[in-house]
Image (cartoon, rainbow, N blue to C red):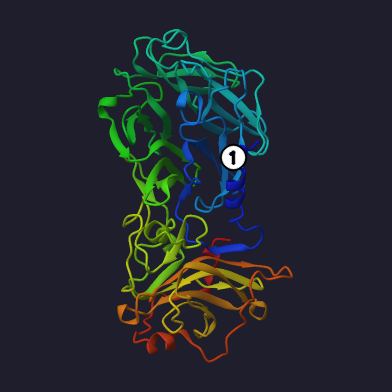
Amino acid sequence: MRRPELVLALALLAAASFAGGDILYDFEHPFFVEEGNVKCKDHALVRHDGIYHLFYIQSIPFAGPGGLDLEQWLGHATSPDLRTWTRRDSILPAVPDSWEDGFIWAPFVLENPWGEGWRLFYTGAEDSPDVRQRTGLALSDDLYDWTRAPENPIYEPDDWTDWDEPVHGEAACRDPELFRIPGFEGFHMINSVRTSLGHGAWSLAYSEDFLNWEQQDTLFYHGSANVLESPSLYLDSSGRKHMFYTEFNYDGSYHMSSDSYLGGWDKTNAVFFDAGEGPELTDFGDRVVFSRFSKVSLPVSGSRYYIRFDEIDPNPADPPQKNPLPGFREHWHSRFGNAADHQPTWGDNPLERYQVGSNMEGSGYLSTVERYGGPAGTGYPGSLRGAAPVGLIESDPFALSRDRVSLRVAGGDLPELCFVALVRVSDGRIWFLETGRNEWGMDLRIWDTTSLVGEEVFLAVADLGSLSHGAWAWISVDTIREYPFTGEDEVTPATPLPGDLFLPQIVEDAGFDYPATEPMTFSKLRKLFR
């Protein structure tokens, strides 16, 4: 079930993910970015058949019961690479006149270890003065369609907490985190609660069927009224246990560690870990992903909310070391110059500066004139490099396999200096070349590559102009992709250029050397995003 007020916005964004055809390069950052003023908060990340599934609190600010954010469903999005996301139907809408009619929070998802399908644990809360919170369970065979367990709610804390008749605020029992300890058949679950004395704590319960939970000793007792929210447990290769969490009334994510699952947690040794909140550590076996939510304030667009993804270094450390996911340079190299510095651009930067849109798709694109690399990069919203940067950027080689290539281009009308080109690997011949039209907004271009299927090629983005060539001496490009011709082109396609245009010669005519870089071997094709 999808929320009516977001149907149009979600449908438009889903349309940006091309059906059929392989995206070669779309210059996205490792972020999931929500639309407009919608918040994305506590979340879970799973991977199935090579596709990442993100489930998260999808929140409309100050529109819910008691003036709180409207949080009565969970958002769902999928991605092949943690960069390009497709929004799916929202799941688990709140049930009127029930124990979960006020809020739906904090998903935790795992594959069913005792059978088929998936299990999603979440916090349901009443529309009541004390916002009474319990843990619910939902079941799915495919990660898209979810059914609530008829036994819900499956867990609520014992009377040692400030829950049954709270005197210190909310009846807290939220943010379930499950883990399995060697030697135990079942799972342990913790929730963020408040004790009868008004102090924050993590409850601990145990179950061998996900439905019947036996209360255990408290996992951690915090000698403060601040609830420790969004706990996430990670086990490193040395056996050290790491807990990440957000402390109520404090910004950012924190870390503490222990040699034992069920003891030894000491907040006096806790350290600040990251400026984002709602931390999640997800171990996929071949990689450990660290994710958290945050926001950025933009001059024109206002607040934009996002979930950012990084990797955890596999070498044991206390706290673990987080490393950025590889950027677009994983599949591109610079021949010379600084045109690729501060790239990709994050967000619609010309809009924030001039209130003129870039016509970008997604949340990132390549532009030699822009300086804003986003919350994880350099610059500030709207910041501009200008026409001074020069350079040449080239992609890994690949074999053309479709009869159409599309891309979006903007910048100056300087075909001999600022352009995007498709180049033959063997001799540098330019088959196609696009330049700007002295506009900020990128427009669609299509190449008819029917006669070139099987050719070994690479892409080149050149900014060979400088301030002496005027303020439009720059180039922008977004979403370069191959796709099959379906009988009708959205715009008139270009055909291959005559055979006397070669990239090294254009570069030298502009006054630059065409230096050698690492050898371009066709074996790099296997690295492409396909």
Relative depth, front residue between 38 and 513: 38
Q: Residue at x 44, y 37 (%)?
A: 280
Query: Which quadrant, please, contains the N terminus?
Result: top right
Residue furthest bottom in the image: 500
Residue 442 locus on image (x, y percent)? 50, 67
Asked whether residue 313 appears in the rendered view, the answer is: no
Q: Residue at x 42, y 64 (%)?
A: 329
Q: Quadrant of residue 417?
A: bottom left
Q: Is residue 215 left or right of residue 228?
A: right
Residue 510 locus on image (x, y percent)? 37, 86
> Which amino acid, by three-letter code, is at mark 1?
Glu
Residue 105 vertical placement versus 29 (above, below):
above
Q: Quadrant of residue 462?
A: bottom left
Residue 75 vertical placement versus 480 (above, below):
above
Asked whether residue 260 appears in the rendered view, the answer is: yes
Residue neighbourhood size for the residue with mark 1, other residues' Cα within 10 Å, grouped as few (<14), some (14–19), many (≥20) = few
Residue furthest front in the image: 355
Relative depth, front residue between 170 and 272: 170
To which residue does mark 1 refer? Answer: 5
Residue 518 vertical placement versus 227 (above, below):
below
Element on which disc 1 rests: helix
Query: Which quadrant, please, contains the C terminus?
Result: bottom right
Q: Is residue 426 left or right of residue 150?
A: left
Relative depth, front residue between 160 and 384: 384
Count of numbered circles on the image? 1
Residue furthest left in the image: 268
Residue 518 locus on image (x, y percent)? 40, 74
Residue 210 locus on image (x, y percent)? 59, 22
